[in-house]
Image (cartoon, grey):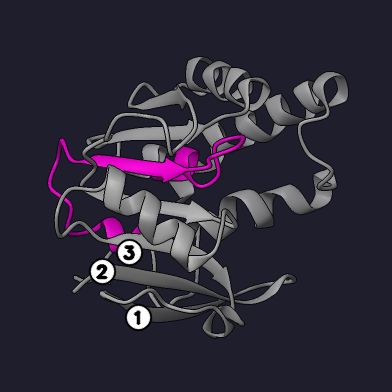
Amino acid sequence: MTPDPWHPGAMDPRLPKELAAPLGRYLVLLERWNRTHALTALPASERKEELLLDAAALLPFLADLPPGSRVVDLGTGMGSPAVVLALARPDLEVLGVDSAAKKLAFLRQAVMELPVPNLKAVQGRLEDLPSLQADWGTAKALGSLSQLTAWWSRHGKPGAPFFALKSRDWAAEALPVGWQATPHPYSLPTRGDRVVLELRAE
């Protein structure tokens, strides 16, 4: 992992200043949609930290990806972390994948309004979709390590890394044979200690 412009300190998530305006529009749009569609039970006061700042923990791991690479967010929901990744790296192709039509309808609206043209919403079950042939993958609070590695084996290119946003008790989960896990701990201001878990096939 090379030095990056987003994190001056070790694993201290920070949102790039230039993203303040589009991410502000994202939060306003989410609040508007949530009143009608009940997308999330997360209080409005906690959304920036949980949905956006948490996603910023992944930004250093994008530093080595060349332009044009395909990034996939499995189980993206309302676009966390896909929106932050796509805005921070407009030279990448970012796919937000989910089976929930309502949440992806919101994400498509966000793509138009922010705007974030390099982000595409993909609807479908991870077990059923054809391989997405991704260069880099992530997921937040989606499933067990066994599930994540199985999905990534299907959708990632050979040797492509996967970065799971996990709680600090991730080690209680069984790591499937044939996989290596490297934890990168970080902390959020009010929501505590977490880990970016880097998964690679051996």
Q: Which mark is residue 56?
A: none
Per the rendered image, the range of residues in magenta is 58-85
**Residue at x-position 36% and y-position 21%:** 117
> Residue 137: percent from the left, percent from the top?
34, 51
**Residue at x-position 76% and y-position 22%:** 33
Q: Is residue 10 shown to the viewer in this render?
A: no
State the CA–CA distance, disc 3 to disc 2.
Answer: 17 Å
With 172 as the anchor, is 152 left or right in this view? Answer: left
Is residue 81 found inside the magenta-colored segment of the image? yes
Question: In this rendering, which labeled residue sits more in front, label 3 or label 2?
Answer: 2
Q: Say which quarter of the image contains residue 2.
A: bottom left
Task: State the residue position of label 2.
Answer: 200
> Residue 74: percent from the left, percent from the top?
45, 44
With 168 as the anchor, is 121 left or right in this view? Answer: left
Residue type marked 2: Arg
* Number of other residues with Cα within 10 Å of mark 2, as a class: few under 14, some 14 to 19, many 20 or more: some
**Residue at x-position 35% and y-position 42%:** 72
Q: Which of the marked residues, 3 or 1, is nearer the chain's N terminus?
A: 3
Question: In this rendering, which labeled residue sits more in front, label 2 or label 1?
Answer: 2
Tell me if label 3 and label 2 are in contact, CB under 8 Å: no
Q: Secondary structure at mark 2?
A: strand
The quarter of the picture where the N terminus appears is bottom left
State the CA–CA distance, disc 2 to disc 1.
Answer: 9 Å
Task: State the residue position of label 1.
Answer: 182
Count the marks: 3
Tell me if label 2 and label 1 are in contact, CB under 8 Å: yes
Q: Say which quarter of the image contains residue 70.
A: top left
Task: State the residue position of label 3.
Answer: 60
**Residue at x-position 32% and y-position 77%:** 177
Residue type marked 1: Thr
> Residue 6: percent from the left, percent from the top?
37, 61
> Residue 102: percent from the left, percent from the top?
67, 21
